[in-house]
Image: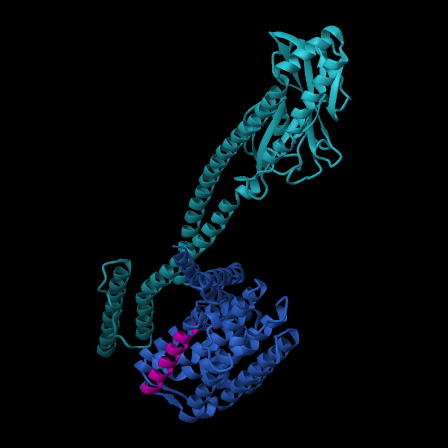
Chain colours: A cyan, B blue
């Protein structure tokens, strides 16, 4: 192999190795930076969505309280409680009916007396879970979650109960069936979640895994049908608010980065997540660009190797040419020995050797001519 | 900054292509020597294909990448650059002379090849069948050259000397393998970088991929010929330049385009701007080359200046009408 090729191989190997090592470090640093930023953003989105969801629940509570806090309703309810007067029940039905008509998202409302007797029902309220008066008696919350269900169109609806008090005394409760589309709408806002990101609400099942409540971006039929046991969702339904980074997979088995929150009002979990592959796309593209750039820049090593090779080879070739000419009998030619590098040293040594050979040859010829040994 | 990255990619790709092509040729020639293949055969096959390997890999690589206009642009642009630039620039320093008699048959073949290629382009996309015809013809040309030279001891000796001159052939088996391996790895790598950089640069500059193929990439792959011819002119030995350009152009049209069309996943479409402009320029350049090689027998300073000016004008036109793929919006367009 000639000097030029050796130099090219060496320089390219060194430059490629160093640039690839630099690229690997840069990729790792960029990946970590991007992951930290993405997870921080996810955490912020999760917190924002939790606050939005909480606001919706507060809104529901306020709407129901606007109904249950009407003084005439409460007076008539106490009257019904005490006397069982049907006229009181009709008054209550009129008041509740008028109020419910003004709130389209309210699907139905049933008013119970404190002893658990049903007073009136307006609209449709599922009866699968009977009212537990003791729970409400003890409940301090103005709104107690009961359950979730799907309507005929497959849309999520929620049942909750609001206690009715008069002068600090529990006189009854209102069981309310309310559309949960406001909650679903918040989960379906994918701002800041790219192409694959999604938000899911889930509740803990008796088995300890999680039942998805809302339709998902990746599974529109998930609502109340899909039970999952991936780490972030299970953590969320268990009340953990945290972030999940490398090595975590979602219900699809895809690696994700996620942030979780707990929705205390209903004891639900909230998960905001994005696919790691999508988030890392810019870094992967950066790595490809760096790789191409590293190879491209190493071409300068090829150019340098070629130029250096030619520079080093030229005096050596000249020296070889001088040696060839001396061998062919041109005893007066000498190598150019002006440089002070190793090649110059070699050239000077070569010239001294040539001089010595020429002197020895001339001496030999002289002796031969004189006939002496 | 992004454009600078693509330029670096173009440059890096070109250097890798040239180095890998060189390694492949040296490894192959060394292997053929060990295998006892006659130098004349090695020269006409390994060296001929090896020295055109950059163009070949660029064209195949771009066809595979779904940018076939770069493939055809590279071939047409290289042939234009070979005549107008590679012959024009050195003639400014020293007149290029040639043996008119010896180059006569080569001129006929080159003109015939150019005409056939242009006709195929006008007939529609260049598919496997058309590629096979082109590639079959280059095999015929190579066999004819081998027969012509065989039995002539002087020609064979010259071929042997030419084959080894300045190559620095590896001698050990492992080193030969390394040269071949690096050559075969480096060629697609260089082609990938050059095509990628070229396509991205075209997008940045707002020109078509065809324009980049015709200009930057074609110019890049013609640089070795330009350097050789320029050095020959500076050393006042430019008598081989015309013959080299004739051979290179014929090889581009028949071997590079033929093989590319044969291995491309789909027929290579010919952009309309080629039919109305670039192919005509290429054909015109081929006619000028034939005239210079077989009638005039030399290229003086004035002719060199005219060739160079023509190339400059061609480049200006290419980049002046990016919306028509480089073709001037003349009648009927």
Q: In this view, does A356 lie to the left or right of B73?
A: left
Position of the C terminus of chain A, as image quadrant, is bottom left
Classified by dominant secondary structure, the portion drawn in magenta counts as: helix
Name the residue rendered at 31%, 81% in the picture. Answer: B92
Q: Is residue B127 magenta?
A: no
Q: Please state if A206 lies on the left or on the right of A268 as rendered.
A: right
Whether A51 is drawn above or below B327: the answer is: above
The image quarter in which residue A82 lies: top right
Name the residue nearer the viewer: B216 or B276.
B276
- Is residue A1 in view? no
Instruction: Please tell me which residue lies in front, A113 or A255.
Output: A113
Start-end of magenta stretch: B302-318
**Which quadrant would residue B119 be assigned to in this image?**
bottom right
Identify whether B77 is placed above or below A20.
below
Q: In which quarter of the image is residue A78?
A: top right
Task: Residue B331: give x, y in percent of width and height.
Answer: 48, 82
Instruction: Name the foreground residue: B3 vs B104.
Output: B3
Residue B316 is one of the magenta-drawn residues: yes
Instruction: Give the quarter of the figure containing the N terminus of chain A.
Output: bottom left
Q: Nearer the viewer, residue A287 or A359?
A: A287
In percent of width and height, residue A253 lies at 65, 37
Residue A293 at what x, y percent from top left?
44, 54
Would residue A48 be visible to someone looking at this image? Answer: yes
**Left of A152 or right of it: where is B323?**
left
Is A174 left or right of B190, judged from the image as shown?
A: right
What is the x, y in percent for residue A158?
68, 26
Q: Which residue lies furthest to the front in this view?
A: A87
Which residue: 57% across, 44% down? A195
């Amino acid at each position: 192999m000639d000097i030029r090729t050796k130099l090219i191989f060496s320089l390219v190997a060194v430059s490629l190795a160093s640039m690839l090592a630099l690229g690997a470090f840069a990729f790792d640093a960029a990946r970590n930076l991007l992951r930290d930023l993405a997870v921080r953003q996810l955490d912020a989105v999760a917190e924002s969505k939790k606050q939005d969801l909480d606001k919706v629940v507060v809104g529901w509570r306020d709407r129901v309280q606007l109904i249950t806090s009407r003084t005439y309703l409460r007076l008539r309810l106490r009257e019904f409680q005490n006397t069982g007067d049907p006229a009181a029940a009709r008054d209550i039905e009129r008041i509740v009916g008028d109020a419910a008509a003004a709130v389209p998202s309210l699907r139905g409302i049933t008013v119970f007396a404190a002893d658990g007797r049903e007073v009136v029902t307006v609209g449709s309220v599922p009866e699968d879970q009977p009212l537990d008066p003791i729970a409400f008696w003890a409940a301090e919350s103005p709104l107690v979650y009961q359950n979730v269900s799907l309507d005929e169109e497959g849309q999520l609806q929620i049942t909750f109960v609001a206690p009715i008090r008069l002068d600090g005394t529990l006189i009854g409760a209102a069981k309310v069936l309310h559309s949960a589309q406001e909650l679903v709408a918040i989960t379906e806002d994918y701002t800041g979640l790219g192409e694959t990101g999604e938000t899911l609400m889930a509740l803990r099942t008796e088995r300890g895994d999680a039942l998805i409540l809302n339709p998902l971006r990746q599974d529109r039929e998930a609502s109340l049908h899909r039970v999952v046991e991936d780490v972030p969702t299970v953590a969320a339904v268990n009340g953990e608010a945290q972030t999940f980074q490398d090595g975590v997979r979602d219900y699809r088995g895809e690696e994700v980065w996620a942030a979780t929150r707990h929705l205390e009002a209903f004891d639900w979990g909230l998960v905001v997540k994005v696919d790691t592959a999508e988030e890392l796309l810019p870094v992967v593209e950066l790595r490809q660009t760096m790789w191409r750039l590293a190879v491209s820049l190493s071409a300068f090593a090829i150019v340098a190797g070629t130029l250096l090779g030619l520079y080093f080879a030229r005096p050596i070739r000249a020296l070889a040419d001088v040696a060839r000419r001396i061998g062919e009998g041109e005893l007066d030619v000498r190598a150019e020995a002006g440089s002070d590098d190793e090649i110059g040293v070699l050239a000077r040594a070569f010239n001294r050797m040539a001089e010595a050979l020429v002197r020895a040859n001339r001496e030999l010829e002289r002796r031969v001519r004189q006939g002496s040994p | 900054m992004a454009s600078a990255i693509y330029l670096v990619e173009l440059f890096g790709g070109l250097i890798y292509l040239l180095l890998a092509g060189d390694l492949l040729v040296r490894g192959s020639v060394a292997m053929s020597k060990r295998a006892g293949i006659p130098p004349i055969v090695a020269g006409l096959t390994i060296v001929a294909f090896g020295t055109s390997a950059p163009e070949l890999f660029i064209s195949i690589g771009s066809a595979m990448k779904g940018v076939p206009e770069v493939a055809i642009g590279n071939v047409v642009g290289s042939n234009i650059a070979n005549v107008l630039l590679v012959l024009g620039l050195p003639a400014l320093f020293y007149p290029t002379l040639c043996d008119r008699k010896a180059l006569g048959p080569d001129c006929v073949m080159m003109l015939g090849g150019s005409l056939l290629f242009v006709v195929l382009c006008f007939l529609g996309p260049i598919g496997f069948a058309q590629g096979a015809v082109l590639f079959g013809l280059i095999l015929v040309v190579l066999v004819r050259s081998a027969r012509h030279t065989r039995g002539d001891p002087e020609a064979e000796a010259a071929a042997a000397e030419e084959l080894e001159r300045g190559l620095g052939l590896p001698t050990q088996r492992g080193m030969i393998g390394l040269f071949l391996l690096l050559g075969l790895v480096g060629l697609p790598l260089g082609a990938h970088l050059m095509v990628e950089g070229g396509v991205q640069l075209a997008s940045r500059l707002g020109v078509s991929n065809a324009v980049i193929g015709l200009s930057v990439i074609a110019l890049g792959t013609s640089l070795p010929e330009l350097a050789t011819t320029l050095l020959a002119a500076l050393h006042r030995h430019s008598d081989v330049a015309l013959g080299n350009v004739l051979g290179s152009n014929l090889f581009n049209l028949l071997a590079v385009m033929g093989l590319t069309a044969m291995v491309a996943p789909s027929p290579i479409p010919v952009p309309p701007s080629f039919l109305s402009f670039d192919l005509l320029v290429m054909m015109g350049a081929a006619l000028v080359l034939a005239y210079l090689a077989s009638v005039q027998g030399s290229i003086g300073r004035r002719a060199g200046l005219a060739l160079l000016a023509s190339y400059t004008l061609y480049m200006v036109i290419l980049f002046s009408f990016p919306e028509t793929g480089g073709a001037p919006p003349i009648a009927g367009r």
